Amino acid sequence: MKLINLQKNNRGVGFGTLFLLEILCVFFFVIIVFLSCLLGRLVIFFKTGMVIFDLVGDIFQSIKVGGVAGLILGVGLWMKARLQEGKGSRK
């Protein structure tokens, strides 16, 4: 089995990296927001004893909030990586 040196295949920070960051950040934020909605519903259930559950509404809300937050975070991380790549090549 041959080991692959990942440093040798480093092509820099391009638009492929931006796309990958966007997908990953949006995915993780959607999951985090959805789990937060479920946790909030669980807390309300234990405090009041009533079950208020709207799965479709929670999914749409988590996609909206997670999508916006994930896009902003992905672009920010990509810009930071681009700036650090440019700063590293000047030295």
Image (cartoon, rainbow, N blue to C red):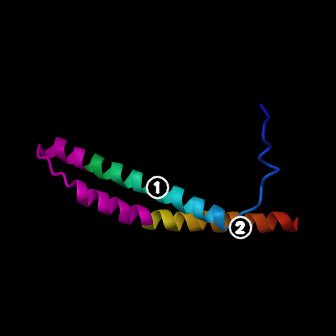
Residue 15 in the image: state x and y as whole percent.
65, 68
Q: Which mark is residue 82?
A: 2
SS category of the residue bearing label 1: helix
Q: Amino acid at mark 1?
A: Phe
Which residue sits at x=69%, y=63%? 81
SS category of the residue bearing label 2: helix
Give the extent of the magenta segment: 41-67
Residue 13 in the image: state x and y as whole percent.
71, 63
Q: Nearer the viewer, residue 2 or 57?
A: 2
Q: Which of disc 2 and disc 1 is earlier in sequence? A: 1
Which residue sits at x=23%, y=44%? 42
Residue 54 in the image: state x and y as whole percent.
20, 55
The residue pinned by badge 1 equals 27
Main structural element of the magenta stretch: helix, strand or loop? helix
Relative placement, left or right, of 91 versus 67 is right
Question: Residue placed farthest to the front in the image?
Answer: 1
Q: Answer whether residue 49 is magenta in the image.
A: yes
